[in-house]
Image (spheres, grey):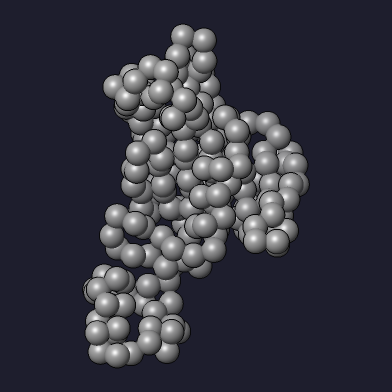
Amino acid sequence: MTEKILFDYLRELVTQGIDPKDREAEIWTDYGQEVAVFVLDSVGFSRTTESDGIVHFLSKMMQMRELVIPIYEEFKPIHHRLAGDNIFAAFDSADAAINAAIEVQQKLAASGLMLVDDEPFQACIGIGYGQLLFSQTLEGYFGDEMNLASKLGEDIATGGEILITKRAWNHARDQKERRVSKRQLQIAGVSIDYYALDSL
């Protein structure tokens, strides 16, 4: 892999009058990685900030991070980053990402961490797997499976759920005994299959 940062290289090409699409194969060779991506989003950010204030939510988010980060780090992520109430991580296999997600949801549910007095702190997780471009910057990974995992984790999943793209599920080798429900998502008029773990 080249030592140049992806966006620096793209900028260099554009500055030279070269369309990066003409170098697409080279870019994928130099910056592509086949990884499983894990996207965690917390539940109730806007609602709780409105009702209880940002300091309250941030204190709860900090406690969630202190609980969750050591758990998924046990599964040896290749890369991870924090962004607001989201956690993004990449693993070398779909099984590692799924197992990390299960462990996170189980431990979070058992922790007793409360968002407010009558509501436990919950998280949603989306998982994808595929060939992605790695930016070597805070942005992390780019590509279809990153987009789908983010959509599932941030927009589709409800608290406590783990949603998995079809590609990620098909590449999971050690999960076949787990029960899943097949679902569909509509994006720009296209139906996309994904799976929800039925039990953790």
- Residue 193 location (% of width, % of height): 71, 55
Instruction: Give the left or right position of residue 4, taking residue 46 as reference.
Output: left
Number of numbered markers: 0
In this view, the residue in front, 144 or 200, is 144
Q: Residue at 66%, 45% (x, y): give it.
A: 175
Can you say whether 97 is above or below 161 in the image?
below
Q: Residue at 29%, 90% (x, y): give it.
A: 17
In this view, the residue in front, 169 or 160, is 160
- Residue 18 location (% of width, % of height): 33, 90
Image quarter for residue 23?
A: bottom left
Q: Quadrant of the N terminus?
A: bottom left
Whether residue 59 is visible, yes or no, is no
Q: Residue at 36%, 57% (x, y): give it.
A: 140
In this view, the residue in front, 171 or 159, is 159
- Residue 200 location (% of width, % of height): 63, 31
Instruction: Give the left or right position of residue 25, taking residue 55 as reference.
Output: right
Can you say whether 22 is above or below 131 in the image?
below
Q: Residue at 42%, 89% (x, y): give it.
A: 22
Can you say whether 109 is above or below 126 in the image?
above
Whether residue 160 is visible, yes or no, is yes
Looking at the image, the residue that sits furthest to the front is 50
- Residue 71 location (% of width, % of height): 41, 34
